[in-house]
Amino acid sequence: MARAASETWKIAVLTSGHGRGSNLLALHQAFARHNWPLRISFATASGATAPVVRLCAELHIPCHILNPRCQEAFEARLLELCREGRIDLIALAGFMKLLSSAFLDQAGIPVLNIHPALLPQYGGAGMYGLRVHEAVFAAEERFSGATVHLVDPLYDHGKIIAQEKVDISDCPSPEAIAARVLEAEHQIYAPAILSYLSQKFR
Ligand code: GRF
């Protein structure tokens, strides 16, 4: 599909209750810095006290508090918001819950996630946050990295869109690995979104 030069792809970013929002910030900054035809139309957070709520206020990004524990209500409201906002792509950034296949079908737009490891290794249920880096550290891996993938109804399972490998051989702790991998996350997510949408709608 051809795209007029003035059009901007609209992105919704889903985060969790404890989300720092560093990936959301990196996306926002990259879109603006490169003047890419992408903008974050809204974010979601699962609680009003999540740090990402304040971050969104500072960035003037609408942030909806939606609790994903009640999956049916969460998905119904998210679907409404995506339709009202004519959202082109959903980007998960620290969002911990699965999305149902019914939601993914009805939304009819790509949903991407970023994971702090080289999938398919170190992904799946229970592999989130520091646990990922603890497992990588315990296995004495020399490399870890960040992966952007399409979301399906399984954890960390969909097609891989982009991956960045980082040397962690001198990292003395899981925390040090996490910090190094996070830098890679911030580098790859925005270009992966641009490249995915550009190819899809070329
Ligand atoms: C990131 O490490 C991301 O890979 C994972 O959750 C974390 C979110 O961090 N899915 P932040 O809130 O974007 O800083």
Image (spheres, rainbow, N blue to C red):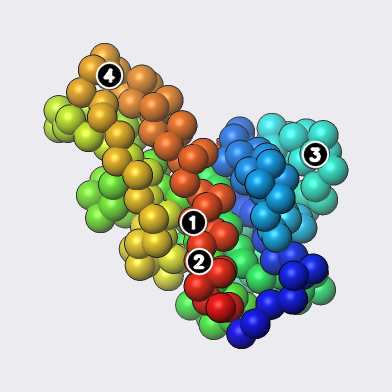
In x, y percent, where is residue 47?
Answer: 70, 43
| Discs 4/1, front | 1
In x, y percent, where is residue 104?
Answer: 54, 76
In x, y percent, where is residue 87?
Answer: 71, 69
Distance Cα–Cα, label 4 vs label 3: 33 Å
Distance Cα–Cα, label 3 vs label 1: 22 Å
Residue 48 in sight here: no
SS for callout 1: helix
**Counting other residues with Cα less than 10 Å from the Cα at mark 3, is it few (<14), some (14-19), or many (20 or more)?**
few
Q: Is mark 2 within 8 Å of ligand 1?
A: no
Give amino acid for label 3: Leu
Residue 174 in sight here: yes
- N-terminal label among 2 and 3: 3
Quarter of the image with the C terminus is: bottom right
Give amino acid for label 4: Cys
**Counting other residues with Cα less than 10 Å from the Cα at mark 2, is it few (<14), some (14-19), or many (20 or more)?**
some
Residue on which the image places disc 1: 192
Give amino acid for label 2: Tyr
Residue on which the image places disc 3: 59
- N-terminal label among 4 and 1: 4
Residue on which the image places disc 4: 171
Residue on which the image places disc 2: 196
| Discs 3/1, front | 1
Distance Cα–Cα, label 4 vs label 1: 26 Å
Question: Position of 202 compared to 182: left or right?
Answer: right
Residue 129, above or below 35: above
SS for callout 4: loop
